[in-house]
Image (spheres, rainbow, N blue to C red):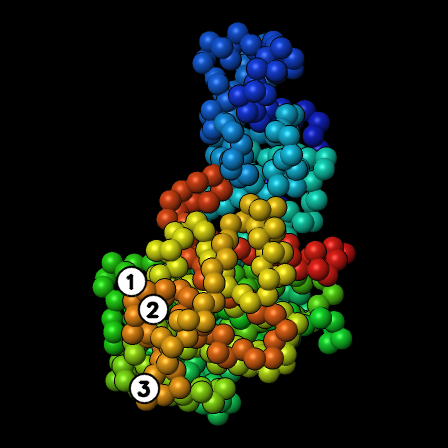
C-alpha cells in the first residue's frame, strides 16, 4: 500500500494538533492553549502517553487536538493519531523538542498501515490527513514508508498466496519498478547451477524452490549485496514443528521481504551503489522427496553439511546464497533472516540481534538504530562455540549438539560461507510484532531496514 494519500501539501484551514509532554502542557496552558485551559483541566488531561483530547471550537466544531506522549520515549507514539482523530486535515502545531518533521510524518504514515486484503467489508477511507511539517523530507518519508509497507504486506500474506513463485514474482515486480535486472533459477536448475542446499530444502514441496537474483546500479560503484531468507512456509520438515509453532510460519520469508524493502529504498533514492539482492525462495514441506535427518549434502562452496535437524533449514538455503554473493567480494554483504528461536529468547521480539566482526560497521549500525528508532543489538560471533557446528561425518552440522547459544552458532554457521566480502553482517530478525503499539500492529514487521538504509545513505550520500 502507498503512504502518499495520508499527507497533503496545503495546511490552510488544517486543524492544529499539539503533541505534548507533561512539562510542555504546563507551559502551553499559559500560552497557546490558554483559551482551552479550563477545558483541559476539567477533563483531567495530563499529557499521559497515548491520551488524546479534542478541543471544542466556539462554533461547535473541533478547534484542535492535544495528544500526550508522556516522557516521549516512543518515537512513533504519534502513529496512534490517525486512528484517534475524526476525518479531516490536520497540522502539527506543537511538537516535543528534538522530534523532526520527517520522523513525525513517518509515524503518521505508519499509523495508517492496514493489511485488509482479505477483509472485503474493510474499505479504505479518506481518514485523517496531515499537512506536511515544514522540516519534513517528503521523498524520504515516502520511500521509507513504502519500503516498510512492501515488506509488511509480503510477510502478512498467507502462505497459500505467497509461495516461492509468488515471492519471486514480487521481487521481479520491485526490480521492474526501478529498472533493475533480475533472473530466477527454478526447480532442478538449482542442481545444474550448483545450489544443492537450496534444492535439498525445497525438494519436499510441490512448489518448486527458486533463487532470485536482482541487480541494479553501475558496476564501478561500491558493491552492496543483500541476502534474504525466503522460506515461504516452514513446517519443520520431517522434524515437524508442533502446531502452535506453525501458526506464524508464513513469516519465515521475513528476511526476503526485508531485503526487498531495503532494495526499494536504495533504488528509489538512487544511491551510487552496485546493488545485488539474492533470495532463496523455498517451502520446507513433508513428502517422500523431503530431506532427512542424517542426510549429508555438499554445498555450493564445497563444504559438506550433515542434517541434524530439518527444522534448521534457513541456514542451509542462506549458505548457498551467501557463497554465491561472496564470490564477487562485495564491499558490504548483509544477510537477513528469521533464523532462530534462540534470538527471540535472548533479546525478545522487539530487539533483533545482529552479528558482525566489523567494529566500524557495528558502530554505524548502532548509531543508526538510535537515530531512526529502529532497534537492534549486537551479539558476539564467539569463536569458542565454533566446535559446536562441527560434524563427525561432514564438515559442518546444521544442528549443534548444545541447545545453548543458538543464535550465535547459527551466525557462525553462516559466516563459514563468507570469505571474500570486505564486511559482513547477519541480522536474526523476528519479522513480527507480537503485541500492538502505535504504528506497529500485531503481525508483520520489517525490523532494522530503516537503520540499515540510513547507514547506506550516510556512506554513499543522500538521495537525488
Q: Residue at x 50, y 45 (%)?
A: 113
Give the x, y percent position of residue 327: 59, 83
Q: What is the crowding at mark 1: few (fewer than 14 residues within 10 Å), some, or many (at least 20)? A: some
Q: Residue at x 47, y 28 (%)?
A: 49
Disc 2 designates what residue? 234
Q: Residue furthest left?
A: 242
Q: CA distance from mark 2 to mark 3?
A: 27 Å
Q: CA distance from mark 1 to mark 2?
A: 7 Å
Label pair 2/3, CB-CB below 8 angstroms? no
Disc 1 designates what residue? 246
Label pair 1/2, CB-CB below 8 angstroms? yes
Give the x, y percent position of residue 194: 49, 89
Q: Residue furthest bottom?
A: 192
Disc 3 designates what residue? 392
Q: In terms of depth relative to the viewer, which is nearer, 363 or 320?
A: 363
Task: Please report whichever mark, 2 or 3, sits nearer to the chain's N-terminal start.
Answer: 2
Residue 70 can be seen in this image: yes
Q: Residue furthest top?
A: 38
Give the x, y percent position of residue 80: 49, 35
At mark 2, the secondary structure is strand
Quadrant location of residue 282? bottom left
Q: Which image quarter is the C terminus in?
A: bottom right
Q: What is the crowding at mark 2: few (fewer than 14 residues within 10 Å), some, or many (at least 20)? A: many
- Disc 3 versus disc 1: nearer the observer: 3
Task: Please report whichever mark, 3 or 1, sits nearer to the chain's N-terminal start.
Answer: 1
Q: CA distance from mark 3 to mark 1?
A: 31 Å
Q: Is residue 301 above or below residue 343?
A: below
Q: In terms of depth relative to the viewer, which is nearer, 243 or 453?
A: 453
At mark 1, the secondary structure is helix
Q: In terms of depth relative to the viewer, which is nearer, 158 or 139?
A: 139
Amino acid at each position: 500500500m502507498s503512504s502518499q494519500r495520508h499527507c497533503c501539501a496545503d495546511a490552510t484551514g488544517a486543524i492544529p494538533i499539539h503533541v505534548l509532554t507533561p512539562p510542555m502542557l504546563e507551559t502551553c496552558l499559559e500560552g497557546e492553549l490558554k483559551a482551552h485551559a479550563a477545558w483541559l483541566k476539567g477533563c483531567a488531561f495530563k499529557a499521559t502517553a497515548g491520551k488524546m483530547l479534542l478541543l471544542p471550537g466556539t462554533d461547535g466544531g473541533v478547534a484542535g487536538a492535544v495528544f500526550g506522549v508522556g516522557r516521549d520515549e516512543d518515537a512513533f507514539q504519534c502513529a496512534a493519531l490517525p486512528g484517534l482523530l475524526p476525518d479531516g486535515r490536520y497540522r502539527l502545531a506543537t511538537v516535543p523538542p528534538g522530534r523532526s518533521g520527517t520522523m513525525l510524518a513517518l509515524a503518521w504514515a505508519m499509523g495508517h498501515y492496514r493489511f485488509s486484503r482479505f477483509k472485503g467489508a474493510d474499505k479504505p477511507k479518506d481518514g485523517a490527513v496531515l499537512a506536511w511539517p515544514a522540516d519534513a523530507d517528503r521523498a524520504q518519508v515516502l520511500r521509507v514508508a513504502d519500503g516498510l509497507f512492501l515488506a509488511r504486506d509480503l510477510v502478512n500474506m498467507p502462505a497459500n498466496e505467497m509461495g516461492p513463485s509468488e515471492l519471486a514474482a514480487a521481487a521481479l515486480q520491485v526490480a521492474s519498478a526501478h529498472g533493475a535486472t533480475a533472473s530466477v533459477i527454478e526447480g532442478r536448475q538449482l542442481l545444474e547451477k550448483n545450489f544443492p542446499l537450496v534444492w535439498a530444502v525445497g525438494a519436499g514441496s510441490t512448489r518448486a524452490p527458486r533463487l532470485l537474483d536482482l541487480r541494479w546500479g553501475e558496476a564501478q560503484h561500491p558493491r552492496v549485496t543483500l541476502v534474504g531468507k525466503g522460506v515461504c512456509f516452514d513446517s519443520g520438515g520431517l522434524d515437524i514443528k508442533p502446531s502452535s509453532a506453525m501458526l506464524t510460519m508464513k513469516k519465515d520469508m521475513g528476511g526476503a521481504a526485508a531485503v526487498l524493502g531495503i532494495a526499494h529504498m536504495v533504488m528509489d533514492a538512487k544511491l551510487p551503489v552496485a546493488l545485488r539482492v539474492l533470495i532463496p525462495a523455498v517451502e520446507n514441506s513433508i513428502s517422500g522427496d523431503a530431506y532427512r535427518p542424517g542426510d549429508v549434502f555438499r554445498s555450493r562452496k564445497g563444504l559438506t553439511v550433515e542434517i541434524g535437524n530439518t527444522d534448521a533449514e534457513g541456514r542451509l538455503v542462506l549458505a548457498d546464497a551467501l557463497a554465491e554473493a561472496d564470490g564477487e567480494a562485495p564491499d558490504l554483504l548483509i544477510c537477513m533472516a528469521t533464523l532462530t528461536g534462540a534470538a527471540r529468547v535472548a533479546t525478545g521480539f522487539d530487539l533483533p540481534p545482529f552479528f558482525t566482526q566489523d567494529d566500524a560497521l557495528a558502530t554505524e549500525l548502532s548509531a543508526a538504530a538510535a537515530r531512526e528508532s529502529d532497534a537492534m543489538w549486537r551479539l558476539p560471533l564467539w569463536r569458542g562455540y565454533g566446535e559446536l557446528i562441527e560434524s563427525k561425518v561432514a564438515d559442518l552440522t546444521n544442528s549443534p549438539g548444545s541447545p545453548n547459544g543458538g543464535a550465535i552458532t547459527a551466525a557462525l554457521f553462516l559466516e563459514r560461507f563468507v570469505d571474500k566480502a570486505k564486511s559482513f553482517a547477519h541480522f536474526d530478525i523476528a519479522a513480527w510484532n507480537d503485541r500492538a503499539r502505535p504504528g506497529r500492529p500485531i503481525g508483520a514487521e520489517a525490523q532494522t531496514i530503516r537503520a540499515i538504509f540510513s547507514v547506506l545513505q550516510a556512506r554513499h550520500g543522500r538521495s537525488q
